[in-house]
Amino acid sequence: TSSDTIGPETFCSSSDAAMATSGRSCRKMFRALVPPLRPRQWIWERQGLVRHRHSNRQVVGEKEQNMLIHWFCTGLRRLLTENRGNTEEILRNLKDVRRNVPGMPWLRRSGAVPYICMAMQMEIVIAIESNDAHSANFFARLAYEAAIEGLVDFHSAHMITHWSKKAFTNKGWSTDALSELVAPSNCLIQNDIILGVKEKIETAIPSLLEEGYAIVPEFLGQNWSQRLQEDFRELVDDRRPDFQSGEMDVTGRSDQSLRGDRILWLDGLDESRLLASSLSQILQKTVLQTLRGELRKHNIYLSHPSMAITDTMLAVYSPKKKGFVKHLDSTDPEDLRKISAVYYLSTVNEENGGQLVLYPDTGKVMAGSI
């Protein structure tokens, strides 16, 4: 599976109108979840606002951003009124709200995440300002339940929970209920795993800067690797009709003599495949955020995490079929991808094949067993 990041980072500010309904205490969270927009800034597939990875891009300005904020904030408020604390019904109906955004039939699930988080954050702010500890706790916990249901990713849910703990502490409220929130056991978004991934990425930075690539063995460890292999095999069997031939370039053409894989794009929000989805979130969020922070120390700037170009691409190669010829991941001048992160789900050996071959400036490199 692989995911890509883009650069350079865009420095610009959103207008206050885009956040007017949220109040001052929500603005920092909003900027963390939704990247600021220039009037004609392109938003790529990772934010869910285009139909295709390389074409049919959709211009999204502050008008559309404001509409999405209003749609999800009023939608969540209506569901809270109608369902009176019934978490299951609220989340089930919130999926319908996400599915029926007016005038945006192309909005994908990942594109709705920042605005769902914004709506939940706004409810927490209202409860805190009303000194309603019970409601504030409910909404903070709702964010974590939303992550389990695939409405938001666990990183965003954790951000909301972390912010809520600080706000509750300032109010003198107990944070015990929030401290009990942990990801399910079949999910990679665990504190020890996240810390381990960050440490390994930080260790790999010198090689990335000096050689142009870095190999991180035992990225998640043997136990999780085995569990992921089993989960992805089931996913491939279940979703076999959804796979398509890998594309060679921006024209969308496929050539099995040059590229023999079948691919499936994963947005990391499939609640029925929590383990597989959490790997997508690790690649899209943990790896990107760590790279972004570490590379900034070397004056190299990657874009906001919400603007990573791609969802995670699951690539499956059949035995004894053609692999992938020598190629560049980014060939389109308008394709801003700078870094590719690849996680091998199968053991690379002489029997299975699948060896990674790199062609840096220093010459051909065989990455070996990963």
Image: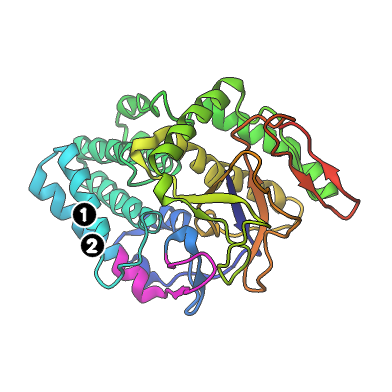
Q: What coloring was used for the rendering?
A: rainbow
Is 112 located above or below residue 39 in the figure? Answer: above
Determine which of the numbered discs, if any, sits on residue 100 in the image: 2
Residue 203 picture quarter: top right
User: Which residue position is annotated with label 1?
Assistant: 96
Determine if the magenta segment contains residue 16.
no
Q: Residue at x 20, y 60 (%)?
A: 74
Residue 134 picture quarter: top left
Q: Residue at x 18, y 44 (%)?
A: 90
The C terminus lies in which quarter of the figure?
Answer: top right
Residue 270 as seen in the image, left or right of residue 210: left
For the residue pair 36 and 166, the one nearer the viewer reads as 36
Give the class, few, some or many, for how many residues have Cα within 10 Å of label 2's Cα (few <14, many ≥20).
few
Residue 365 place in picture, x, y as percent = 85, 44
Which residue lies most toward the bottom here? Answer: 40
- Residue span colored magenta: 49-68
Is 60 located above or below residue 23 in the figure? Answer: below
Q: Residue at x 76, y 42 (%)?
A: 214
Residue 331 as seen in the image, left or right of residue 363: left
Q: Are marks 2 and 1 in contact (CB under 8 Å)?
A: yes
Q: As shown in the figure, which amino acid type bears the numbered disc 2?
A: Asn
State the CA–CA distance, disc 2 to disc 1.
6 Å
The N terminus lies in which quarter of the figure?
Answer: top right
